[in-house]
Amino acid sequence: MILRSYLFSQFSGSYQQYTSDQSENFLKQLCKNCCTDNQIAIHRDGNLMYYAYVYKKSASEIYGLCIVCGEICLNLKWLYEFLQSTLEALANRGILFCYDESGKIRKNIDSFSSEAAEVDSVFREMQENVNGRQSYWGNLPPEDFSVSMDSKISLAFNEDDKNKITAAIRHYHNVIVTMDNVIPSSFSRTVERLNSEKGQLQEEKEALKKEIESLSQQKKQYRWVFILFIAVIVSLVGLYSLNNSISDMNTCIAQLQDTLSNKRDSIRQQNIQIQELSADIVSCRDSLRTFESKFLSVKDIFPIHITNIEIGNIYHNGEIETDYGNMIYSSHTMYLQPKITYVGINTGCSVDLKIKWYMPNGLIKTGNSSPSGYSQQESLYVYSGSNSKILSGWGNTTKGHWIKGEYRIEIWYENVCLNSKAFTIY
Protein backbone atom coordinates (compact mmCIF):
# COMPACT_ATOMS: atom_id res chain seq x y z
CA MET A 1 0.00 0.00 0.00
CA ILE A 2 2.95 2.33 0.76
CA LEU A 3 4.67 3.21 -2.52
CA ARG A 4 7.52 5.24 -1.03
CA SER A 5 8.72 6.43 2.39
CA TYR A 6 10.89 9.39 3.40
CA LEU A 7 12.82 10.46 6.50
CA PHE A 8 13.79 14.14 6.55
CA SER A 9 15.29 16.80 8.81
CA GLN A 10 16.06 20.50 8.82
CA PHE A 11 18.68 21.82 11.23
CA SER A 12 19.94 25.45 11.24
CA GLY A 13 18.85 25.94 7.61
CA SER A 14 20.45 22.69 6.36
CA TYR A 15 17.93 20.22 4.87
CA GLN A 16 18.51 16.45 4.54
CA GLN A 17 16.30 13.67 3.17
CA TYR A 18 16.40 9.88 2.65
CA THR A 19 15.66 8.85 -0.01
CA SER A 20 16.36 11.94 -2.12
CA ASP A 21 14.16 12.57 -5.20
CA GLN A 22 11.74 15.13 -6.68
CA SER A 23 9.71 15.26 -3.43
CA GLU A 24 12.48 17.31 -1.77
CA ASN A 25 10.98 20.71 -2.71
CA PHE A 26 7.56 19.75 -1.32
CA LEU A 27 8.97 18.46 1.98
CA LYS A 28 11.15 21.57 2.38
CA GLN A 29 8.05 23.76 1.95
CA LEU A 30 6.21 21.49 4.39
CA CYS A 31 8.76 22.30 7.11
CA LYS A 32 7.94 25.99 6.60
CA ASN A 33 4.14 25.49 6.58
CA CYS A 34 3.90 23.51 9.85
CA CYS A 35 3.80 25.77 12.92
CA THR A 36 3.61 23.17 15.71
CA ASP A 37 4.56 19.50 16.23
CA ASN A 38 0.95 18.31 16.48
CA GLN A 39 0.20 18.61 12.76
CA ILE A 40 0.04 16.21 9.84
CA ALA A 41 0.51 17.56 6.33
CA ILE A 42 -1.28 16.08 3.30
CA HIS A 43 -0.20 16.72 -0.28
CA ARG A 44 -1.87 15.39 -3.42
CA ASP A 45 0.06 14.92 -6.66
CA GLY A 46 -2.27 13.30 -9.20
CA ASN A 47 -2.96 9.75 -8.01
CA LEU A 48 -0.36 9.96 -5.23
CA MET A 49 -1.05 11.06 -1.65
CA TYR A 50 1.78 12.30 0.60
CA TYR A 51 1.16 12.05 4.39
CA ALA A 52 3.86 13.68 6.49
CA TYR A 53 4.24 13.94 10.28
CA VAL A 54 6.46 16.84 11.37
CA TYR A 55 8.19 16.94 14.78
CA LYS A 56 9.14 20.56 15.46
CA LYS A 57 11.69 20.63 18.27
CA SER A 58 12.37 24.34 17.67
CA ALA A 59 12.04 26.92 14.90
CA SER A 60 15.38 25.83 13.42
CA GLU A 61 15.29 22.09 14.21
CA ILE A 62 12.62 19.95 12.51
CA TYR A 63 12.34 16.20 11.86
CA GLY A 64 9.68 14.19 10.08
CA LEU A 65 8.39 11.02 8.42
CA CYS A 66 6.44 10.88 5.15
CA ILE A 67 4.68 8.02 3.34
CA VAL A 68 3.36 8.04 -0.23
CA CYS A 69 0.23 6.02 -1.06
CA GLY A 70 -2.20 5.64 -3.89
CA GLU A 71 -5.23 5.81 -1.55
CA ILE A 72 -6.79 8.23 0.92
CA CYS A 73 -6.51 7.58 4.68
CA LEU A 74 -9.93 7.21 6.36
CA ASN A 75 -8.53 7.19 9.93
CA LEU A 76 -6.28 10.25 10.13
CA LYS A 77 -6.01 10.08 13.94
CA TRP A 78 -4.55 6.56 13.72
CA LEU A 79 -2.10 7.62 10.98
CA TYR A 80 -0.91 10.61 13.06
CA GLU A 81 -0.36 8.44 16.15
CA PHE A 82 1.33 5.74 14.02
CA LEU A 83 3.87 8.17 12.46
CA GLN A 84 4.43 9.87 15.85
CA SER A 85 5.07 6.54 17.61
CA THR A 86 7.40 5.43 14.78
CA LEU A 87 9.60 8.52 15.26
CA GLU A 88 9.60 7.96 19.04
CA ALA A 89 10.57 4.30 18.48
CA LEU A 90 13.55 5.48 16.40
CA ALA A 91 14.64 7.70 19.30
CA ASN A 92 14.33 4.74 21.70
CA ARG A 93 16.60 2.67 19.44
CA GLY A 94 19.26 5.38 19.70
CA ILE A 95 20.77 4.92 16.20
CA LEU A 96 19.16 7.57 13.97
CA PHE A 97 17.66 9.68 16.79
CA CYS A 98 17.88 9.89 20.57
CA TYR A 99 16.41 11.93 23.45
CA ASP A 100 18.16 14.92 24.98
CA GLU A 101 18.13 15.76 28.70
CA SER A 102 14.82 17.59 28.37
CA GLY A 103 13.11 14.57 26.78
CA LYS A 104 12.99 16.01 23.26
CA ILE A 105 14.03 14.07 20.16
CA ARG A 106 17.25 15.06 18.45
CA LYS A 107 19.30 13.66 15.54
CA ASN A 108 22.04 11.18 16.53
CA ILE A 109 23.98 10.92 13.20
CA ASP A 110 25.34 13.34 10.61
CA SER A 111 23.76 11.68 7.56
CA PHE A 112 20.78 9.32 7.18
CA SER A 113 22.55 7.57 4.29
CA SER A 114 25.32 6.43 6.68
CA GLU A 115 22.71 4.18 8.35
CA ALA A 116 20.79 3.27 5.18
CA ALA A 117 20.20 -0.33 6.35
CA GLU A 118 18.55 0.92 9.58
CA VAL A 119 16.32 3.38 7.67
CA ASP A 120 15.29 0.71 5.13
CA SER A 121 14.43 -1.65 8.01
CA VAL A 122 12.15 1.02 9.53
CA PHE A 123 10.48 1.59 6.16
CA ARG A 124 9.74 -2.15 5.85
CA GLU A 125 8.19 -2.20 9.33
CA MET A 126 6.01 0.78 8.38
CA GLN A 127 4.93 -1.02 5.19
CA GLU A 128 3.88 -4.13 7.15
CA ASN A 129 1.95 -2.06 9.72
CA VAL A 130 0.01 -0.09 7.09
CA ASN A 131 -0.75 -3.20 5.00
CA GLY A 132 -2.35 -4.77 8.07
CA ARG A 133 -4.95 -1.95 8.27
CA GLN A 134 -6.53 -1.93 4.81
CA SER A 135 -9.88 -0.88 6.28
CA TYR A 136 -8.33 2.49 7.15
CA TRP A 137 -7.83 3.33 3.46
CA GLY A 138 -10.19 4.14 0.59
CA ASN A 139 -10.32 5.26 -3.02
CA LEU A 140 -9.17 8.77 -3.91
CA PRO A 141 -11.88 11.37 -4.61
CA PRO A 142 -11.95 12.90 -8.12
CA GLU A 143 -9.23 15.50 -8.69
CA ASP A 144 -10.14 19.11 -9.45
CA PHE A 145 -7.71 20.02 -12.25
CA SER A 146 -8.59 23.71 -11.99
CA VAL A 147 -6.90 23.91 -8.57
CA SER A 148 -3.32 25.23 -8.41
CA MET A 149 -0.59 22.88 -7.12
CA ASP A 150 0.28 25.61 -4.57
CA SER A 151 -3.25 25.75 -3.12
CA LYS A 152 -3.23 25.29 0.68
CA ILE A 153 -5.67 25.13 3.60
CA SER A 154 -5.24 24.57 7.35
CA LEU A 155 -7.90 22.66 9.33
CA ALA A 156 -8.45 21.49 12.89
CA PHE A 157 -9.08 17.75 13.23
CA ASN A 158 -12.66 16.88 14.16
CA GLU A 159 -13.45 13.20 14.83
CA ASP A 160 -17.15 13.80 14.03
CA ASP A 161 -16.59 15.58 10.69
CA LYS A 162 -14.04 13.56 8.69
CA ASN A 163 -15.77 14.44 5.40
CA LYS A 164 -14.48 18.01 5.74
CA ILE A 165 -10.88 16.77 5.32
CA THR A 166 -11.84 14.56 2.35
CA ALA A 167 -13.49 17.54 0.66
CA ALA A 168 -10.44 19.70 1.36
CA ILE A 169 -8.18 17.12 -0.32
CA ARG A 170 -10.38 17.33 -3.42
CA HIS A 171 -10.21 21.12 -3.68
CA TYR A 172 -6.70 21.79 -2.30
CA HIS A 173 -3.38 20.14 -3.14
CA ASN A 174 -1.93 20.94 0.31
CA VAL A 175 -3.91 20.36 3.54
CA ILE A 176 -2.40 21.02 7.01
CA VAL A 177 -4.42 19.28 9.77
CA THR A 178 -3.86 20.27 13.41
CA MET A 179 -4.45 17.42 15.88
CA ASP A 180 -5.87 18.33 19.32
CA ASN A 181 -5.13 16.73 22.71
CA VAL A 182 -1.60 15.64 21.82
CA ILE A 183 -0.30 13.33 24.54
CA PRO A 184 3.45 13.58 25.26
CA SER A 185 5.45 10.36 25.06
CA SER A 186 6.05 8.31 28.20
CA PHE A 187 9.76 9.01 27.82
CA SER A 188 9.15 12.79 27.98
CA ARG A 189 7.12 12.42 31.19
CA THR A 190 9.84 10.22 32.68
CA VAL A 191 12.50 12.81 31.88
CA GLU A 192 10.44 15.57 33.55
CA ARG A 193 10.10 13.42 36.69
CA LEU A 194 13.83 12.64 36.70
CA ASN A 195 14.67 16.34 36.32
CA SER A 196 12.55 17.07 39.41
CA GLU A 197 14.31 14.31 41.37
CA LYS A 198 17.65 15.62 40.11
CA GLY A 199 16.90 19.01 41.67
CA GLN A 200 16.11 17.41 45.03
CA LEU A 201 19.31 15.36 44.91
CA GLN A 202 21.29 18.51 44.09
CA GLU A 203 19.97 20.17 47.25
CA GLU A 204 20.92 17.11 49.31
CA LYS A 205 24.37 17.16 47.69
CA GLU A 206 24.93 20.78 48.75
CA ALA A 207 23.95 19.94 52.35
CA LEU A 208 26.37 16.99 52.43
CA LYS A 209 29.11 19.18 50.94
CA LYS A 210 28.78 21.66 53.81
CA GLU A 211 28.95 18.81 56.33
CA ILE A 212 32.11 17.45 54.67
CA GLU A 213 33.76 20.89 54.83
CA SER A 214 33.03 20.99 58.55
CA LEU A 215 34.63 17.59 59.10
CA SER A 216 37.62 18.61 56.96
CA GLN A 217 38.37 21.50 59.32
CA GLN A 218 38.46 19.07 62.25
CA LYS A 219 40.96 16.80 60.45
CA LYS A 220 43.54 19.48 59.63
CA GLN A 221 45.19 19.19 63.05
CA TYR A 222 45.98 15.52 62.41
CA ARG A 223 47.39 16.05 58.90
CA TRP A 224 51.02 16.69 59.78
CA VAL A 225 51.15 13.70 62.13
CA PHE A 226 49.84 11.51 59.33
CA ILE A 227 52.38 12.92 56.81
CA LEU A 228 55.28 12.19 59.21
CA PHE A 229 54.04 8.63 59.69
CA ILE A 230 53.86 8.09 55.92
CA ALA A 231 57.41 9.45 55.48
CA VAL A 232 58.78 6.90 57.98
CA ILE A 233 56.97 4.06 56.22
CA VAL A 234 58.30 5.18 52.80
CA SER A 235 61.87 5.27 54.13
CA LEU A 236 61.64 1.72 55.48
CA VAL A 237 60.18 0.47 52.20
CA GLY A 238 62.98 2.23 50.27
CA LEU A 239 65.70 0.49 52.32
CA TYR A 240 64.08 -2.90 51.74
CA SER A 241 63.75 -2.26 48.01
CA LEU A 242 67.41 -1.22 47.73
CA ASN A 243 68.54 -4.55 49.18
CA ASN A 244 66.45 -6.47 46.66
CA SER A 245 67.30 -4.32 43.62
CA ILE A 246 70.83 -5.76 43.14
CA SER A 247 69.51 -9.34 43.06
CA ASP A 248 66.74 -8.32 40.67
CA MET A 249 69.29 -6.60 38.40
CA ASN A 250 71.37 -9.77 38.05
CA THR A 251 68.27 -11.80 37.25
CA CYS A 252 67.24 -9.22 34.63
CA ILE A 253 70.66 -9.39 32.91
CA ALA A 254 70.39 -13.18 32.61
CA GLN A 255 66.88 -12.87 31.13
CA LEU A 256 68.07 -10.28 28.59
CA GLN A 257 70.86 -12.61 27.45
CA ASP A 258 68.31 -15.38 26.88
CA THR A 259 66.08 -12.94 24.96
CA LEU A 260 69.01 -11.87 22.75
CA SER A 261 69.73 -15.49 21.86
CA ASN A 262 66.06 -16.08 20.98
CA LYS A 263 66.00 -12.93 18.79
CA ARG A 264 69.01 -14.17 16.82
CA ASP A 265 67.22 -17.47 16.15
CA SER A 266 64.12 -15.53 15.07
CA ILE A 267 66.17 -13.40 12.64
CA ARG A 268 67.58 -16.52 11.00
CA GLN A 269 64.05 -17.93 10.55
CA GLN A 270 62.79 -14.63 9.09
CA ASN A 271 65.67 -14.57 6.58
CA ILE A 272 64.55 -18.00 5.39
CA GLN A 273 60.94 -16.71 5.06
CA ILE A 274 62.16 -13.69 3.06
CA GLN A 275 63.85 -16.00 0.58
CA GLU A 276 60.65 -18.05 0.23
CA LEU A 277 58.53 -14.88 -0.26
CA SER A 278 60.94 -13.64 -2.94
CA ALA A 279 60.34 -16.86 -4.85
CA ASP A 280 56.55 -16.35 -4.46
CA ILE A 281 56.85 -12.80 -5.86
CA VAL A 282 58.59 -14.10 -8.99
CA SER A 283 55.78 -16.66 -9.43
CA CYS A 284 53.09 -13.96 -8.99
CA ARG A 285 54.74 -11.75 -11.60
CA ASP A 286 54.67 -14.63 -14.09
CA SER A 287 50.95 -15.15 -13.35
CA LEU A 288 50.30 -11.41 -13.83
CA ARG A 289 51.99 -11.42 -17.23
CA THR A 290 49.85 -14.41 -18.25
CA PHE A 291 46.67 -12.60 -17.12
CA GLU A 292 47.61 -9.40 -18.96
CA SER A 293 48.15 -11.41 -22.15
CA LYS A 294 44.67 -12.95 -21.83
CA PHE A 295 43.17 -9.54 -21.00
CA LEU A 296 44.53 -8.02 -24.22
CA SER A 297 42.83 -10.76 -26.24
CA VAL A 298 39.45 -10.15 -24.53
CA LYS A 299 39.19 -6.34 -24.59
CA ASP A 300 38.51 -6.21 -28.35
CA ILE A 301 35.43 -8.41 -27.81
CA PHE A 302 34.24 -6.70 -24.60
CA PRO A 303 35.42 -3.04 -24.73
CA ILE A 304 33.29 -2.24 -21.64
CA HIS A 305 31.63 -4.17 -18.81
CA ILE A 306 28.12 -2.78 -18.22
CA THR A 307 27.22 -3.25 -14.54
CA ASN A 308 23.81 -1.53 -14.43
CA ILE A 309 21.06 -0.04 -16.64
CA GLU A 310 18.39 2.39 -15.36
CA ILE A 311 15.53 3.96 -17.37
CA GLY A 312 14.34 7.56 -16.93
CA ASN A 313 11.37 9.49 -18.36
CA ILE A 314 12.61 12.74 -19.94
CA TYR A 315 11.20 15.90 -21.52
CA HIS A 316 12.42 16.94 -24.99
CA ASN A 317 14.70 19.59 -23.42
CA GLY A 318 16.40 17.00 -21.19
CA GLU A 319 14.51 17.87 -17.99
CA ILE A 320 13.70 14.79 -15.91
CA GLU A 321 10.03 13.88 -15.43
CA THR A 322 10.70 10.49 -13.73
CA ASP A 323 14.18 9.93 -12.32
CA TYR A 324 16.29 6.97 -13.38
CA GLY A 325 15.24 3.77 -11.61
CA ASN A 326 11.90 5.13 -10.32
CA MET A 327 8.45 3.74 -11.26
CA ILE A 328 7.32 5.01 -14.68
CA TYR A 329 3.62 5.56 -15.40
CA SER A 330 2.22 5.34 -18.93
CA SER A 331 0.25 8.59 -18.61
CA HIS A 332 3.49 10.51 -17.95
CA THR A 333 5.75 8.89 -20.56
CA MET A 334 7.53 10.94 -23.24
CA TYR A 335 11.17 10.09 -24.03
CA LEU A 336 12.53 6.93 -22.38
CA GLN A 337 16.26 7.43 -21.84
CA PRO A 338 18.72 4.72 -20.66
CA LYS A 339 21.55 5.45 -18.23
CA ILE A 340 24.35 2.86 -18.08
CA THR A 341 27.08 2.28 -15.52
CA TYR A 342 30.17 0.59 -16.93
CA VAL A 343 33.80 -0.31 -16.26
CA GLY A 344 36.15 0.63 -19.11
CA ILE A 345 38.23 -2.25 -20.55
CA ASN A 346 39.42 -1.14 -24.01
CA THR A 347 39.99 2.45 -22.86
CA GLY A 348 40.99 5.53 -24.82
CA CYS A 349 38.90 4.80 -27.92
CA SER A 350 35.32 5.13 -29.21
CA VAL A 351 33.01 2.14 -29.75
CA ASP A 352 29.62 1.91 -31.49
CA LEU A 353 26.88 0.55 -29.24
CA LYS A 354 23.61 -0.73 -30.71
CA ILE A 355 20.39 -0.79 -28.72
CA LYS A 356 17.24 -2.95 -28.97
CA TRP A 357 13.97 -1.74 -27.40
CA TYR A 358 11.58 -4.74 -27.05
CA MET A 359 7.88 -3.83 -26.88
CA PRO A 360 5.33 -5.77 -24.74
CA ASN A 361 4.36 -7.73 -27.90
CA GLY A 362 7.95 -8.98 -28.25
CA LEU A 363 8.78 -6.88 -31.34
CA ILE A 364 11.78 -4.55 -31.60
CA LYS A 365 10.81 -0.87 -31.78
CA THR A 366 12.35 0.69 -34.93
CA GLY A 367 12.26 3.94 -36.89
CA ASN A 368 13.42 5.29 -40.24
CA SER A 369 16.98 5.80 -39.00
CA SER A 370 17.23 2.48 -37.11
CA PRO A 371 20.11 0.17 -38.13
CA SER A 372 19.10 -3.27 -39.38
CA GLY A 373 17.95 -5.50 -36.51
CA TYR A 374 18.27 -2.72 -33.90
CA SER A 375 16.38 0.31 -32.62
CA GLN A 376 19.24 2.82 -32.46
CA GLN A 377 23.02 3.19 -32.55
CA GLU A 378 25.28 5.44 -30.47
CA SER A 379 29.03 6.10 -30.17
CA LEU A 380 30.70 5.88 -26.73
CA TYR A 381 34.19 7.03 -25.77
CA VAL A 382 35.56 4.50 -23.25
CA TYR A 383 37.14 5.89 -20.07
CA SER A 384 39.02 3.82 -17.54
CA GLY A 385 37.52 2.87 -14.19
CA SER A 386 33.83 2.98 -13.24
CA ASN A 387 31.77 5.50 -15.23
CA SER A 388 28.19 6.35 -16.14
CA LYS A 389 26.75 7.45 -19.49
CA ILE A 390 23.28 8.69 -20.48
CA LEU A 391 22.35 7.39 -23.94
CA SER A 392 19.88 8.97 -26.38
CA GLY A 393 16.19 8.71 -25.53
CA TRP A 394 13.32 7.33 -27.61
CA GLY A 395 9.80 8.75 -27.77
CA ASN A 396 8.16 12.14 -28.40
CA THR A 397 6.97 15.28 -26.59
CA THR A 398 3.40 14.08 -25.99
CA LYS A 399 2.78 12.45 -22.61
CA GLY A 400 1.34 8.93 -22.77
CA HIS A 401 3.54 7.91 -25.73
CA TRP A 402 4.41 4.50 -24.21
CA ILE A 403 1.67 2.01 -23.34
CA LYS A 404 1.54 -0.03 -20.15
CA GLY A 405 3.37 -3.34 -20.17
CA GLU A 406 6.61 -5.26 -19.80
CA TYR A 407 9.57 -3.89 -21.80
CA ARG A 408 13.16 -4.96 -22.30
CA ILE A 409 16.27 -3.07 -23.43
CA GLU A 410 19.45 -4.76 -24.73
CA ILE A 411 22.81 -3.08 -25.41
CA TRP A 412 25.00 -4.75 -28.04
CA TYR A 413 28.57 -4.38 -29.32
CA GLU A 414 29.30 -6.11 -32.63
CA ASN A 415 27.47 -9.46 -32.17
CA VAL A 416 27.72 -9.56 -28.36
CA CYS A 417 24.98 -8.47 -25.93
CA LEU A 418 26.83 -6.56 -23.19
CA ASN A 419 23.83 -6.33 -20.82
CA SER A 420 20.03 -6.12 -20.73
CA LYS A 421 17.26 -4.94 -18.39
CA ALA A 422 13.56 -5.72 -18.16
CA PHE A 423 11.33 -2.92 -16.85
CA THR A 424 7.63 -2.20 -16.43
CA ILE A 425 5.56 0.82 -17.44
CA TYR A 426 2.53 1.07 -15.13
Image (spheres, rainbow, N blue to C red):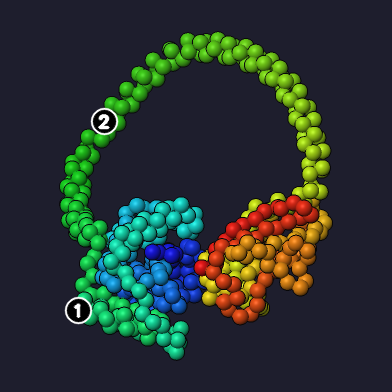
Q: Nearer the viewer, residue 162 or 100?
A: 162
Crowding around mark 2 (Cα neighbors within 10 Å: few <14, some 14 to 19, many 20+) is few
Q: Nearer the viewer, residue 168 or 47?
A: 47
The residue wearing badge 1 is 160
Q: Which mark is residue 322?
A: none
SS at badge 2? helix
Q: Is residue 409 visible?
A: yes
Amino acid at dot 1: Asp
The picture quadrant where one finds residue 158 is bottom left
Q: In x, y percent, where is residue 278?
A: 75, 24
Residue drawn at x 59%, y 58% as measured from the top left: 422
From where the camera sits, is residue 108 visible? no
Image disc number at residue 226? 2
Of 144 and 80, the residue lying toward us: 144
For residue 43, above or below residue 219: below
Quarter in which the N terminus is drawn:
bottom left
Disc 2 vs disc 1: which is toward the camera? Answer: 1
Q: Check disc 2 and give the amino acid type.
A: Phe
Left or right, residue 83 beside residue 271:
left
> In the figure, residue 337 lies in which quadrant?
bottom right
Q: Say left or right for 25 vs 367.
A: left
For the residues labelled 2 and 1, the Cα–Cα distance comes to 81 Å
Residue visible at 25% across and 62% down in the picture: 185
Percent position of residue 290, x then y:
80, 34
Disc 1: CA contacts within 10 A as few (<14), some (14-19) or many (>=20): few
